[in-house]
Image (cartoon, coloured by chain):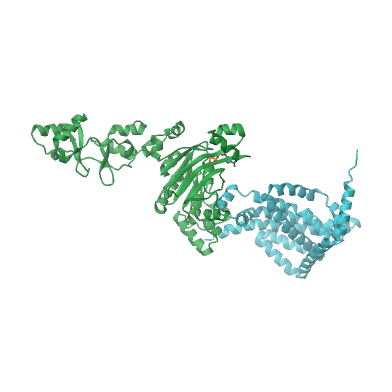
Chain colours: A green, B cyan
Amino acid sequence: MPKLEVKALSKVFGQNPEKILSLLERGENKKSVLKKTGHSVGVNHAAFQVEEGEIFVVMGLSGSGKSTLIRCLNLLIRPTAGEVLIDGENIVTCTRDRLLEIRRKKVAMVFQNFALLPHRSVESNVAFGLELQGVPQEDRLQKARNAIELVGLKGYENSLPAQLSGGMQQRVGLARALATDPDILLMDEAFSALDPLIRKEMQDELLSLQDRMHKTIIFITHDLDEALKLGNRIAIMKDGVIVQIGTPEEILTSPADDYVREFVQDVNRVKVVTASTIMKNPDPVAFAKDGLRVAVRKMREASISSIFVLDKDRHVKGLLTIDSAIELLKDNRTDMDSVLNRDILSVGPDTSIEELLPLVINSKYPLVVVDEEKKMIGFIVKVSVLAGIIGEGA
Amino acid sequence: MFRLEIGSYVERVIDWMTIHWAGFFGAIREGLSAVIGWFGWLFLHIPFVLFVVLLVLLAWRVAGKGVAVFTAVGLLIIRSMNLWTQTMQTLSMITTATLIALLIGIPLGIWMSRSEKANDIIRPILDFMQTMPAFVYLIPAVYFFDLGEVPGTVATVIFAMPPVVRLTNLGIRQVPKDVIEASRAFGATGNQMLFKVQIPLAMPTILAGLNQTIMLSLSMVVISSMIGAKGLGIPVLNGITQLKVGEGFEGGLAVVILAMVLDRITQGLGRFRERKDARKHSSK
Ligand SMILES: Nc1ncnc2c1ncn2[C@@H]1O[C@H](COP(=O)(O)OP(=O)(O)O)[C@@H](O)[C@H]1O
Ligand SMILES: [Mg+2]
């Protein structure tokens, strides 16, 4: 079961939102609904699932409905139609008390402008959620201090929010959300108000926290670099509609439409596109046990001038060139082991182009892509790296 | 032109109320005069020196040395004009009036902040209370409550309550939306929101309302005395009616001193809260 599932979720703002639903069913879009009825469509038939431990990023231009969508996930905004299932429970139809409990224990939120209580100390801000639950003072302060330490604010327990920088204030916001030990974190443009350097620091921090805590995170941003860096999967929104959901690479390499394409065109592909996307299939390859003649025949059939030679576990033994093979045959020898080029570099499938670049430039031979068991799954030549950078053929 | 007999309608309503609600007004009269009497008894039984010391210490703590000195000198001047008893009588009336104004005004302000309908209904009533010349409702007040401190206090409450209502409403409405939203997101109930977020954040504004309410109630001192309330209004009235310029001036001066002392102390109270917070938070 997914941790969080959203089914046919719509939110329309205006006098008579239910009436607008039938228009949306018929495929009318935000613009035409606004023109005809004066109603503003926030979210239009959104549907997705988020697995436990995943960082799910929602990205889109301003006004595309990201904030509305994320607020439907804890019912700060009540959807006009649709379901929000948390651990299989539809929170749209649950009782008021149950909703309070879910907000207090299961789902916490981090806000773009921090939204801290200005009259309370850092410690008391962080303990706020626990205080609402009625956790006794000693207990909640202990948990608050743990959360404060987790986000690196130890020593600032008694400061007021106004005495802290923006980055530190958002750490307080994060600690406040973590203090109740929720399963799900909702983060609405949580880092958008911060300076670029601080922002990057917070992104790294979030990733390292996530490594330890394995929360389910819904992260809203309008920034593609941030989305690519943080997201296990990314949903792209336009005019209230989710137009594409996919891994960062899927979004980059096969954008669903022009809107997404425009989004991704400026991206720094070097950081995102990985070996697995640009590698070529390891076909043909030669196997050591088949001998030299088979290897030569395979090269001839594929009209290539070199071939990788693998052992029976598909581990790479080396690269055989046609020239050395012919030399050997002239001497009537078949022990190809002696002429294999063995200084072959191998990389993992998740290696980014940025990391591949220096390797491929300095290597005479193609790079080999191997899985965790060191089995060859593909190879990379210089030209595929270049193609990957400019976004062709991938 | 036809004439709308608003005046005679009001008269008839007032007459009717005087007869049929006599019990109700009687109870209010008893209650108010007990409270005013109790404060009067308290203030006059505290020895002058102790009273001065207590007030000066309070002034020092919340508003600083300057206000403390001013308070000491001011109270001594009042005493030296032989107006101490009248000042305490006035103080007991405005204390009572202010307490009642807070007791009614803060909940009203909270209600206005939560309901647009309440806001729409109460707002014109507040305008009415503040701008209708006080003399006009002095007369029905005398009908209902007889002469003395009670009708004066009632009139004072009516005139002085609007600021605390308005500023409570304003203060709560000014609480940032994102803070409210965050509190909801963490599962605050309506009451938790009110007492843990809205009222604390609105407190400086509410205190400003308290300050204005006290000032307005002091401005009713002379008017109250015209319907028989004791206190600092008496020497002022004597000054006017019997052309005793000196006595009138002394009474007026005492009112001014009392007003300034209370104003500085209540203003200081707002700043004091902030300073206290800051100290508390930077102590470690
Ligand atoms: N309270 C509201 N009343 C009317 N329209 C709203 C309201 N909140 C959001 N909208 C509309 O919904 C759309 C999506 O807004 P929002 O979710 O804030 O977008 P984003 O967070 O992606 O910038 C916008 O067109 C906006 O005008
Ligand atoms: Mg937004």
Choose between A198 and B244: the one closer to the eye.
A198
Quadrant position of residue B278: bottom right
Q: Judge from the rendering whether residue B268 lies leftward or rightward of residue B8; answer left or right.
A: left
Q: Is residue B231 visible?
A: no
Q: Is residue A236 left or right of residue A346?
A: right
**Residue A343 falls left or right of residue A26:** left
Q: How many marks?
A: 0
In front of the other: B11 or B222: B11
Residue A152 pos. (x, y %): 45, 54
Note whether A19 is above or below B217 in the view shown: above
Is A232 in front, or is A171? A232
- When the figure is inspected, residue B253 is found, relative to residue A330, above or below; the finding is below
Residue A339 percent across, percent down from the top left: 14, 37
Q: Is residue A103 left or right of residue A273?
A: right
Residue beneath the point at 42% across and 53% down: A213
Residue B233 position within the rendered picture, expressed as x and y whole percent measured from the top left: 84, 59
Residue B75 appears in the rendering: yes
* Residue at the left extreme of this rendering: A332
Q: Position of residue A13 (x, y in %)?
A: 59, 40
A275 in relation to B218, above or below? above
Q: Can you say which quadrant of the picture contains the C terminus of chain A?
A: top left
